[in-house]
Amino acid sequence: MNYFIKIVVVMFLLDIPLSFAQTQQEHVHHMSHSVMPFDMSETIHIFNMTEAGGIQRVISRNDDAVHQITLIQQHLKREAEKFKRGDYSDPAALHGQAMPGLKELQTAGADINISYADVPLGGQITFETTSLRLLTAIHRWFGAQLSEHGADAKAE
């Protein structure tokens, strides 16, 4: 038996996943369930960078998906409350601690106004600041999410 087959057999017996390298977008899509209760493939993340910060919206792709819409709204409302306290642990868990803009947002305190609102088909979090440093951090953070969510996200 050649060496490669022996390795595969051992991995199978030890229940070690036989996974090959994946892109960051594939990783984010696959691991999203660990931080988001809704089905990523049933939703779209929309990032709108504004002059005062930005708006992050998540909506259902299907207007009949009442359960998904409820899950989106509950999740974003909870995330907005955590963000107000500087807790960005869910995005960090999904995208990594080195995510652009993350460190600045975690320490921004009252220098960023964060609010949540229900929208048709989902919910949105609005980030507003008068600090150029934090405005840049918000835009960098949105850009990283746009890049890493791939087909599950778009800019507006």
Image: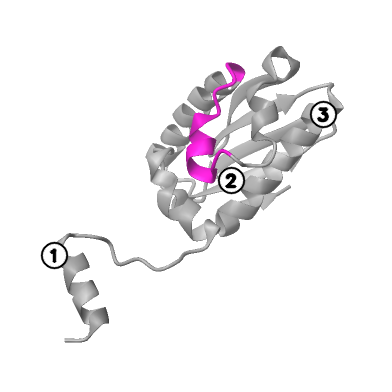
Of badges 3 and 1, nearer the viewer stands: 1
Q: Position of residue 15 (x, y in %)?
A: 19, 60
- Label 3 belongs to which residue? 133
Question: What residue would you read off at disc 1?
Answer: 13
Q: Residue placed at 67% from the left, 27% from the top?
A: 105
The part of the chain drawn in magenta is 84-97
Give the residue type at disc 1: Leu
From the image, which quarter does the N terminus lie in?
bottom left
Q: Residue at x 83, y 23 (%)?
A: 131
Q: Residue 21 at what x, y percent from top left?
A: 45, 66
Residue contact between numbered discs 1 and 2, judged by CB atoms under 8 Å: no
Instruction: Give the quadrant of residue 114.
Output: top right
Nearest to N terminus: mark 3 or mark 1? 1
Whichever of labels 2 and 3 marks the residue nearer the N terminus, that label is: 2
Near mark 1 (Cα within 10 A), the count class, few <14, some 14-19 or many ≥20, is: few
Q: Is residue 111 left or right of residue 42?
A: right
Q: Is residue 112 magenta?
A: no
Asked if the residue at tag 1 contacts the one at tag 3, i.e. Cβ–Cβ closer than 8 Å, the answer is no
